[in-house]
Amino acid sequence: MRRLARYLALSVFLFTAINAHAEDITVFAAASLTNAVTAAAKAYEQQSGDRIEISFASSSTLARQIAAGAPADMFISANQKWMDWLSEQDMIEADTRNNMVANGLVVIAPNDSAINAISLTKDTDITALLGNDDRIAVGDPDHVPAGIYAQQALSYLGQWETLAPRLARADNVRAALALVERGEAPLGIVYRTDAAITPGVKIVGTFPDDSHPPITYPVALIKDAGNDSNANFLAWLLGDDAGKIFTDYGFDQIQATNTGTAK
């Protein structure tokens, strides 16, 4: 009994000691990263004992929240623009900024759609595929990164002027995905990784790489959030263990490169 009592006392001591050093890390991440970052955070929590709290939304929404004083430790954007915007306001630790993963841009349709393949060239008439009244679902090009990339790609193909009035503008890329999945829009433009998370949609076309800037996801610590726990999690996200998780969710793993305050 005494041995059992000593064992239980030691167990309680060790549990308390471990949790006394556990840290809460708050991450603001682009909506398109929801599944991958959630899985990565869970793996890191099990390994480190730290607690990862994540807020997912459009990069623009999150950046504005951070600028307004929201208590974030780390920001992962779906494009460079909104990380640049925070950098210009001296809101990030410049020497922690890195490009983390990359993605592709695709056109999707409901899984039961008769549309099976679209060749996305300058000769393609995407409007003709929409019918008289239907719209194409996209993240709002005024602020959502996926929508900004969509506008750039459609402009490259000479399709923007005719398609702009036919957009179903969503608050983020996952909302655009949902419109197509529910059959409320016959076509949508989302990231390749978004199309892979649901059996309700299918990819019917992939935009050429040169039709838009590279889709890279920058990550950085927020100003004055550079403690050891936050820095350790950032380093882990840029390493091979997290890279395998992102690859499993369809992202392209790229060599982490510090981009500082580059625009």
Image (cartoon, rainbow, N blue to C red):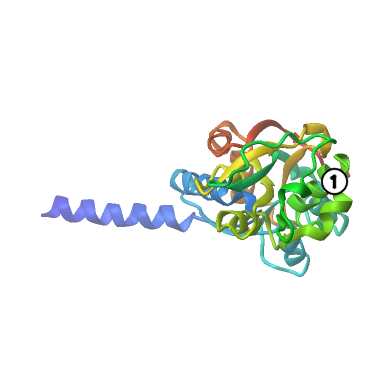
Q: Amino acid at mark 1?
A: Gln
Residue at the image point whose x is 88% and y is 42% from the top: 158
Residue 101: name its quadrant: top right
In the foreground, 16 or 185? 185
Q: Residues within 10 Å of mark 1 (few under 14, many from 20)?
A: many
In the foreground, 98 or 12? 98
Residue at the image point whose x is 46% and y is 50% from the top: 49
Percent of width and height locating residue 168: 72, 61
Residue at the image point whose x is 54% and y is 46% from the top: 111
Q: In the displayed structure, does residue 74 sit left or right of residue 196?
A: right
Percent of width and height locating residue 94: 80, 47
Percent of width and height locating residue 224: 73, 57
Q: Farthest bottom residue?
A: 68
Residue 108: name its quadrant: top right
Q: Farthest front residue?
A: 132
* Looking at the image, residue 61 lies above or below residue 197: below
> Can residue 140 be seen by looking at this rendering?
no
Residue assigned mark 1? 159
